[in-house]
Each structure stands twice: as structure tokens, then as C-alpha cells.
């Protein structure tokens, strides 16, 4: 199974593509789709849409897993990131109906066994699970790979996480 993990963001949208076969993970690619801070919003959203469409063309994932948005205070940031997530959802929904989402707590629990894990713990576990020499950088890409691994670990109950 090939999984595209996405960590939504407007300035940096993290992505990671893994293959999951026989209980083993193989990292195919990871990175970020970046947009320019002072560009008009439609251009930034188009960049996200185009970048994810290109990833689909290259890697043809079976499933797409998103990190669910969580915001504490800044409503302006929340709206902008939600718009970016919307562009990402449209790009992916045009290619597949296999769209899933996981909360940050669920991702931390799946990767480290503890829902309150720190970023350093998450990166160490992702590195270990993928048998990498160094942690994935930048953080947004590492987070997206963690989302993909979480989805791989939830195959038995994945319908519970389907975006409706």
C-alpha cells in the first residue's frame, strides 16, 4: 500500500509518501510545498493544489492521510490554514475517495505510544521506524511522514478515520 501523508499549512505544507508492505515501511519521498508569504491567496492555494497534483502523478498513492487541524488562539491563521487544507483536499479528492484524517494526539500515540510526546521524540521514532540515518527535515515533512505511518498502523480500522 502506498500512502501520502499531509501536514496542512499555508506557508509550508508537509508531505511524505511511504510504501507499507508486510509490516515494513519504506520512505519514497518527503518535503514541503512552500508558498510565498506576500503572494495573493489564490496563487498560494493554486501552488498547493498543483504541488499535490504533481505528487499524485508521480507516486499514485492508494490512500491519503491528513493531520486534522487544531488551533488554540489565532483565528486569522486558522482560516488561512483551513483554506490551504481545502485546496489540498480538492487536489486529492479529484484523484481518490480514500481520504483519512488523524488528530495530533492520535498521531503521537501511534508513533511513540504516548499522546503528549514532544517533537524530538516523534522525530526519533520516525527515524527509527524508517531505519533512516538522520531525522527527516524540515519538521513539516517529518510530521507528514508520521501521519502516513499512523495511517499504515490503522489499516484494520481505517474506515473509522475516513473523511466524511
Image (cartoon, grey):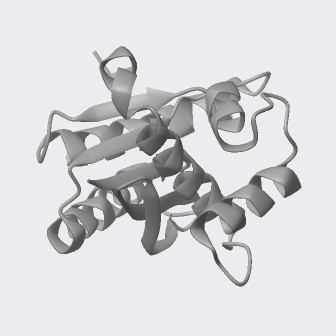
Q: Is residue 2 left or right of residue 14?
A: left
Residue at (70, 25) in percent of width and height:
71
Question: Toward the viewer: 31 or 107?
Answer: 107
In this figure, what is the number of numbered marks?
A: 0
Q: Is residue 159 above or below residue 12?
A: above
Q: Position of residue 64 (x, y in %)?
A: 32, 44
Task: Say whether residue 75 is visible.
Answer: yes
On the rendered structure, is 97 left or right of 55? left
- Residue drawn at x 49%, y 71% as measured from the top left: 30
Image point 27% across, 44% down: which residue? 63
Residue 11, image x and y in percent? Answer: 58, 58
Image location (x, y in percent) of residue 10: 54, 51
Q: Is residue 16 visible?
A: no
Indicate left or right for 74 with 24 as reference.
right
Residue 145 in percent (x, y) is at 54, 57
- Residue at image position (36%, 26%) is 156
For this view, does 100 lie left or right of residue 148?
left
Q: Residue furthest front?
A: 22
- Vertical order, 34 against 145 (above or below): below
In-front residue for pair 45/134: 134
- Quadrant of res 136: bottom right
Task: Find residue 152 and report its image quarter.
Answer: top left
State which quadrant residue 164 falls in. top left
Amino acid at each position: 500500500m502506498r500512502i501520502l501523508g499531509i501536514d496542512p499549512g499555508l506557508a509550508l505544507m508537509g508531505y511524505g509518501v511511504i510504501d507499507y508492505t508486510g509490516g515494513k515501511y519504506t520512505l519514497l519521498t518527503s518535503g514541503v510545498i512552500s508558498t510565498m508569504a506576500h503572494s495573493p491567496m489564490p496563487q498560494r492555494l493554486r501552488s498547493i493544489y498543483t504541488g499535490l497534483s504533481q505528487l499524485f502523478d508521480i507516486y499514485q498513492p492508494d490512500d491519503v492521510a491528513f493531520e486534522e487541524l487544531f488551533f488554540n488562539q489565532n483565528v486569522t491563521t486558522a482560516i488561512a490554514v483551513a483554506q490551504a487544507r481545502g485546496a489540498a483536499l480538492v487536489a486529492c479528492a479529484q484523484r481518490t475517495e480514500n481520504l483519512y484524517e488523524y488528530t495530533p494526539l492520535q498521531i503521537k500515540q501511534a508513533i511513540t505510544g504516548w499522546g503528549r510526546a514532544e517533537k524530538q521524540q516523534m522525530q526519533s521514532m520516525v527515524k527509527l521506524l524508517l531505519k533512516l540515518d538522520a531525522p527527516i527535515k524540515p519538521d513539516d515533512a517529518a510530521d507528514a511522514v508520521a501521519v502516513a505511518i499512523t495511517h499504515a498502523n490503522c489499516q484494520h480500522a481505517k474506515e473509522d478515520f475516513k473523511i466524511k
